Amino acid sequence: MKTFRIIGRNFRDAFKGVFRNFSLSLASISCITITLIVVAISIILSYNVNNFTELVEKDVTIVAFIDNDLTEEEIDTIKDEISVIDHVDTYEFTSKDDITTDMRESSDVFDSVMKNWSDEENPIQNTYQVKVDDIEYIEGVAKQIEKIDGITLVKYGEGIVEQLISTFSLIHTISLGAVVALILVTAFLISNTIKITISSRQREISIMRLIGASNLNIRIPFIIEGLLLGALGSIIPIIITIYGYETLYSSFNGQLFSPFIKLIPPTPFVYLTSLVLLGIGILVGMFGSWRAVRKHLKI
């Protein structure tokens, strides 16, 4: 019971400290709020870019075109050779008849041109569509498939795929770096703001020392005060994250520009992000208070 009373008293003193120095507390809360909004944007951007990259890697397919003069046995032989190549995940045969049908159904222009083709006149080739287990090996796998007898051409969007993934990776790295930098900047700003708050309460701290309060007992209310400032400062960013991202997702039907670039579904993503923001706000507030008390007051 004594422990609970001590904890309760510390929280009570922290609440009093927040409202007694409201203008300075408001400055700290505003600092946390603004920074956490930017942190939330960086987190959302980072995770969505990572999601884009994973989707690209999963969807990239090597298309191997097969000579139309090959027999079914020779086509099966090609399948056997593809199956033993390292890092090949899946492979699927698509006949030229199926490709022709799909093309005709996709466009009236194709249908008009291709409907009168006989089997001998149809220049479209049978294909094997191959996926790799790791995008890093796609170029090497494509080169091995290209060497197989009966394969006339191999395509997988070479150049464009690597450039796209490289761009996504760079954006992801920059976003993560921005999040870390913003957290450090926030901790520094809050520390300095709270330092001003604590400096204005030198008399209060002196009285606490005179009545025999230990260094720990003096520190704890200020650290809890930082916790409260961090929690209060995270409220608006959490609201913006939840409602803002859900609005963005529904407005764009879960994708940006094309079905190729899909957004992460809001649930549970926004709630996990909100917990992260709350945790960052609380930890940064506590760290800022601890740093101000320890370093600048030299308790």
Image (cartoon, rainbow, N blue to C red):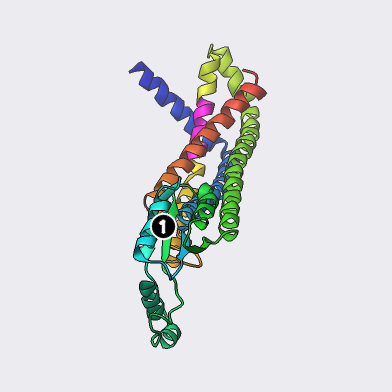
Instruction: In this rendered view, identify the residue nearer to me: 185 or 196.
Output: 185
Is residue 296 visible from the viewing direction of this image?
Answer: yes
119, 214: nearer the viewer: 119
Q: Is residue 226 magenta?
A: yes
Please identify the quadrant where the C terminus is shown: top right
User: Based on the displayed image, in which of its 4 quarters is residue 143 positioned?
Assistant: bottom right
| Crowd around label 1: few <14 · some 14–19 · many ≥20 (10 Å) | some
The residue type indicated by label 1 comes to Ile
Residue 112, percent from left and from top: 42, 88
- Start and end of the magenta stretch? 221-231
- From where the camera sits, is residue 40 visible? no
The residue drawn where x is 45% and y is 63% is 255
246 shown above or below 295 = below
User: Relative to 21, does residue 203 appear above or below in the rendering?
Assistant: above
Quarter holding the N terminus is top left
Residue underneath mark 1: 78
Label count reads: 1
